[in-house]
Amino acid sequence: MAVYEIAGLRVRMAPRYPTLTRQAQPYLAADQQGPVHFTLTVDDAFLQAKQAENPHLTINDCEYIWVGAAFYRALLHYDGFLLHASAVMMDGKAYLFTAPSGTGKSTHTALWQRCFGPDRARILNDDKPALRLLDGAFVACGTPFSGKTDLNINSAVPLQGICLLSRAAENRITRLTGRQALAGLLNQTLRPAEEQEMDRLLRLMDRLLRTVPVYALQCNMEKEAAELSYQTMKSCQEGIAL
């Protein structure tokens, strides 16, 4: 097993199949001898059982999906959780766009790259960024678990804002209250079955909504949508309590 540094945590795991092996490589720790926060183990018998339950998936897919799920379950114990989102980082801040699959999250962050340039607007994680509460503030982190693409960067940057994205003919962005935002965020994360773990997640969500602005973004697929979301979010400093 090797040690990887993911979202500020030292994680021991042993990727065996191509996707996780490739995407985990940039996260390989320089120091392989130090202590670790946790170990991720998923054996072949488990993966074969998952593949039997999901015949449309390959064994490679199953390793990538279920090792990722195990990582995000463990992350809850380190003040972190998954948000199903496309995360773009620009000028030292992270901006997240979350919505059900197929809505256009990746398309919107690609607009940021077209609008501001790919060297300035970089995709931190295109599907499953990790959010962690560190030193009293939330940061967005790249992870090897970025869905169907390799678009992820091993970095952690302050979280500036989150948009609940939907498609529309005209662009409009509206600040949400905590109560308005909570359901949308919970629908785009892993919700644990255990009551104690769910309580942990809800406490983190409450802290997030008190400190990070959340918006409803109705947008088309023109560059003006990227300009509107950036200009609105970049200047806002705090969230709204539930």
Image (cartoon, helix red, strand yellow):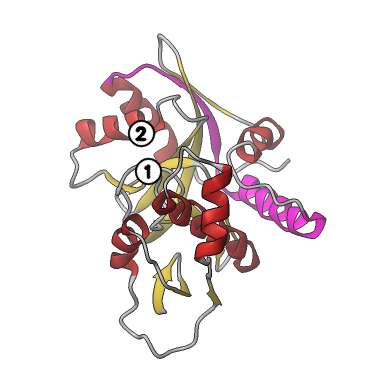
In the picture, the quarter occupied by the N terminus is: bottom left
Kind of residue at disc 2 = Ser
Q: Quadrant of residue 186?
A: top right
Q: Position of residue 153 (x, y in %)?
A: 31, 56
Name the residue carrying label 2: 106
At label 1, the amino acid type is Asp
Please give the name of the residue rendered at 31% of the width and 28% of the height, measured from the top-left corner.
227
Q: Would residue 148 be found to the left or right of residue 189 on screen?
A: left
Q: Is residue 196 magenta?
A: yes
Q: Is residue 38 above or below residue 100?
A: below
From this viewpoint, is residue 7 visible?
A: yes
Tell me the number on the disc at residue 126: 1
- How far across and how far down the image is residue 226, in percent? 33, 28
Secondary structure category for the residue under label 2: helix
Depth check, front residue: 109 or 207: 109
Residue 132 in sight in this render: no
Q: Nearer the viewer, residue 150 or 183?
A: 150
Quarter of the figure with the C terminus? top right
Q: Residue at x 38, y 51 (%)?
A: 93
Which region of the structure is painted magenta? 194-222
Tell which circle, 1 or 2, labels the residue nearer the N-terminal end: 2
Q: Position of residue 15 (x, y in %)?
A: 39, 67
Question: Which disc number belongs to residue 116?
Answer: none
Whether residue 164 is situated above or below residue 54 in the rendered picture: above
What is the count of numbered marks? 2
CB within 8 Å, label 1 to label 2: yes
Q: CA distance from mark 1 to mark 2?
A: 6 Å
Query: In the image, what residue occupies the spot 37% across and 85% down?
Result: 32
Give SS at disc 1.
loop
At label 1, counting other C-alpha atoms closer than 10 Å, the crowd grade (few under 14, some 14-19, many 20 or more) is many
108 to 121, vertically: above or below: above
Nearer the observer, 173 or 189: 189
